[in-house]
Amino acid sequence: MKIAVVFSGCGYLDGAEINEVVATLWALSFHQESGAQVQCFAPDADQHHVVNHLTGEEKPGERRNILEESARIARGKVKPLSMLREGEFDALIMPGGFGAAKNLCTFAFEGSKGSVNPELLHLLKQFRQAEKPIGAACIAPAILALTFNDRSLELTVGESSDASREIEKLGHAHKSMSVQDAHIDQENLIVTTPAFMYDDAPLHAIFTGVKKMVDLVVALVEERSEAAA
């Protein structure tokens, strides 16, 4: 089993939410003990902008590369998104953070009228066409909502919110879930969990929800493998 994890930088205000990335890789590490392989990817492009995480203010004129920033969390073990081949992996997972809605798509600025990074858009459609599971945490389900606006998906970004309403505008069904839960769209092989959409949630609850999401993705891969045997 090979799982691709797609990052959007480093830091929740302008990149990937670090705790969610760690939770995802931690949850996957349990499956690595039984032979699963994990590879991290990120676009080799500039972030939308750079934010001072101490003040929350944008830093005009500063540029950071998404791939280089992602390498901070992946301990250097991250490849350009352009190297990700659907045929080489059994599933794809996307942690959240504002980078998912700013660097991987434009949902943060345009909501239901947003667009997805063309490279990622193509890959997600390939995974769906091949009926391979996709997992997403926090705001990352919005990427799936924009990508598959021709389908009716079941997704969660936590409680009803502006984000959930924008997702529903695209024809998807939003499922309100607690931070410790994950929702599985069995028909579309998509698993989502709210994570830091509950921004005051305790870390152990975030990890619990992310682990459920990861475990469900892995279970879907195993079911698919057994069905093909």
Image (cartoon, helix red, strand yellow):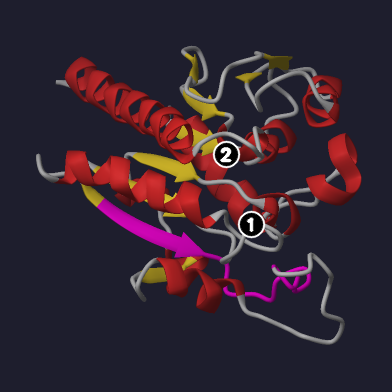
Name the image quarter holding residue 77: bottom left
Magenta region includes residue 40: yes
Q: For residue 12, which numbered disc appears in the image?
A: 1
Magenta region, residue range = 38-53
Neighbor class of circle 2 (other Cα within 10 Å; few <14, some 14-19, many 20+) is some
Name the quadrant of the N terminus.
Answer: top left
Report the front residue among 163 and 114: 163
Name the quadrant of the C terminus.
Answer: top left
The x, y position of residue 115, in whole percent, is 79, 48
Predominant secondary structure in magenta? loop
The answer to whether residue 136 is above or below residue 170 is below
The answer to whether residue 60 is above or below residue 147 is below
Q: Is residue 150 left or right of residue 39?
A: right
Q: In the image, what residue type sits under mark 2?
A: Lys
Q: Would you name the residue on which mark 2 appears?
A: 125
Look at 40% across and 52% down and name the residue there: 22
The x, y position of residue 62, in whole percent, is 77, 85
Magenta region includes residue 217: no
Name the image quarter holding residue 169: top right
The x, y position of residue 48, in whole percent, is 77, 68
